[in-house]
Amino acid sequence: MASYRHLFSLTGPLYVVVAFLGRLPLAMSQLGVLLLVSGVTGSYGAGGATAGALAVANAIGAPVAGALTDRLGQRPVLLVQSVVGSLGLFAVVALAGTYESGDPWWPLTLVAALAGAFTPQVGTMARVRWRPISRRAGREKRELVDAAFSYEGAADEASFVLGPALVGLVGALLNPSAAILAAGILLLLFGTWFAVHPTAGLVGPSTVSAQAAARLLTPALVLLALVQLSVGMVFGSVQTGTSVLATAAGEPGLTGLFHALLGVGSVVAGLAVVAVPETFAYERRLRLFTIALALLSLPLLAVDGLGLLAVVLLVLGLAVAPTMITTFTVTERITDVRRLGAAMTILAATTGMGYAVGSSVAGRLADWGGHRPAFAVTVAASFLALGLALTGARTLRMAQARAAAAPERVPAGSVPSVSA
C-alpha cells in the first residue's frame, strides 16, 4: 500500500481517474459489438468476426500510433484517436439500426474495424508516462516503476471487469446499441482529457535512428508479444463461450457480468504482484503464472451451467493479470526508452490480435458445437502461453542482463510540470 500511495502522490488522484475511465471504451466496445452484431444478424460467427475485426484493426493501428507518439509526443496522436474512434463507434450503432434480416453483415464489420483502428490504447500510453513522471518528481526508483506497472496491469483488468459489466447492465436495461453509444461518449470525454493532461507533455518527441528501430524487434520482445497473443486468445474465446452459454440459458444480457468475473480475481492478483520480491526473477515468474493459467483453464471444459462458470472464471482470473504484468514489465526493462511507446503498443496489439483470433475461432466453433468447443480454444491458448514461457526463459534472462549492463538513454528535451 505504501508503494501505491507514493505512486499516486506523483500525479494526484484526478489523473488516475481520468486514465482509468479513458481505457473503458476499448473494454466495452469489443463485447458491445459482439452482442450487437450477433443480435441483429442472428449469427455468433458474424458477431465474433465483427468483434474480431475491431480488435484486429486496433492491433494494427496501435503500433503505428505508438511509433507516432515516440516521434511526435502523445498529445496530438491521442487527440486524433479519441475523436475519430468515438465517431466510429457512433457509426456502428447507426448502421446496425438500419440492418434487416438477409442483408450482408460485412459493412458492420468494416465500420467496426474503422472504430477499432482509432481507439487509443490508454493503458499502454499510461505505462509509458510513469518513468518520466517519477523522474520529473525526482523520485525515480526501480520499485516505484515496478509498482506503476503492477497498478496499470490491475487497472487494465479492472477496466475489463467494469467495461463488460457496464455493457451487460446497459444491454439488460436498454440494448447493446446504448452500451456502444456509452463507450463512444466515454472515449470522446476521457480519451481527449487524457490526451491533454499535463503528463502527456512528459513524453515528448524524440529522434529515432534506423539502428534503434532495428533493435526494437528483438527475440525477447517477439517472445513476449507471442505470450500476449495467447492471453488475448484467452480473452476472446472466454467472452464468446460465455455469451453462448448465457444465451442458451436464456440470459444473454448477463454475458458482460459473467465475463467480468474473469477480471475480478485478476485485479486482486495484479495488485498483489508488487509484493513479489525482486529476487524472484521475471522469467521464473512468467513460468509460474502461465502454469497457473494453463491448469486453471482446464475446468472450463467441464462447465455446463452459469453457476459453475462463475466460479471457474473467478479463479482463472488469478493467473491473468500477473502474466500480463510480467510481460509488460520485462518489456519496459529491455527496451530503449526512445522506443518504449512502440514496444508497449506492440504488446497491446498482439493482445488485441489474440482476442480477434480467439473470438473468431471460438465463434465459428460455437455455431457448430456450442460453448464447450469455444472454451477448448481458451485451454489451447493457455497451454500455448505456457510453452512459450518454458522455452523462452533463457532468451528473457539474457535480454534483461544486456539491458542492465547498457547505459540508460533519456530523450533530449525539456519536460513540463506534472501538476494535475
Image (tube, rainbow, N blue to C red):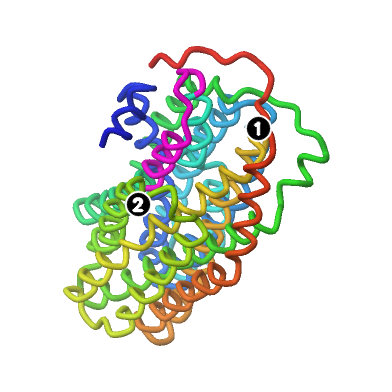
Q: How many marks?
A: 2
Q: Secondary structure at mark 1?
A: loop
Return the residue found at the far right. Answer: 210
Disc 1: CA contacts within 10 A as few (<14), some (14-19) or many (>=20): few
Question: Where does the image place residue 389, in percent across and percent down from the top left?
Answer: 53, 67
The residue that appears at 67% across and 42% down in the rendered structure is 405
N-terminal label among 1 and 2: 2
Region rendered in magenta: 135-153
- Asked if the stretch drawn in magenta spans residue 143, the answer is yes
Depth check, front residue: 405 or 228: 405
Depth check, front residue: 104 or 262: 262
Q: Is residue 388 left or right of residue 199?
A: right
Q: Which picture quadrant has residue 373? A: bottom left
Q: What residue does disc 1 label?
A: 408
Viewer can see residue 177: no
Tell me the amino acid under the disc marked 2. Answer: Phe
